[in-house]
Image (tube, rainbow, N blue to C red):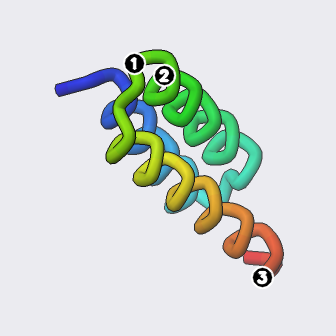
Amino acid sequence: MTRWRILIGLGRIAEAERDAGQARLRYRQALATARAYGDRPAVAASAEALAAVAAFDAAGR
């Protein structure tokens, strides 16, 4: 399993625990890792997860 997938998994756990700050941090780390390796599908998945936490945070959950 690649590092970015692990980071997204940790972000999802943080979201489930209603910790938007920690989720955002993990998703940003996943995005940076994916960019560093030039993995375009991973960049897309990381950006999507980051957008989801922004919506989650905006909804006040």
Q: Residue extending furthest left?
A: 1
Left or right of 35: which side holds 4? left
State the residue at coordinates (17%, 26%): 1
User: Crowdedness of circle 2 by 10 Å Cα count: few (<14), some, many (20+)?
Assistant: many
Q: Which percent across, then down, holds residue 36?
A: 49, 17
Residue 42 versus residue 28: which sits nearer the camera? 42
Which is more N-terminal, label 2 or label 3?
2
Q: Is there a contact, CB below 8 Å, between mark 1 and mark 2?
A: yes
Left or right of 60: which side holds 3? left
Task: Assign a secondary structure to mark 3.
Answer: loop
State the residue at coordinates (68%, 52%): 19
Q: Which residue is mark 3?
A: 59
Q: Which residue is mark 1?
A: 37
Occupied quadrant, residue 55: bottom right
Q: CA distance from mark 1 to mark 3?
A: 33 Å
Task: Assign a secondary structure to mark 2.
Answer: helix
Residue 51 has which mark? none
Asked if residue 55 is positioned above or below residue 26 in the image, the reply reads below
1 vs 3, front mark: 1
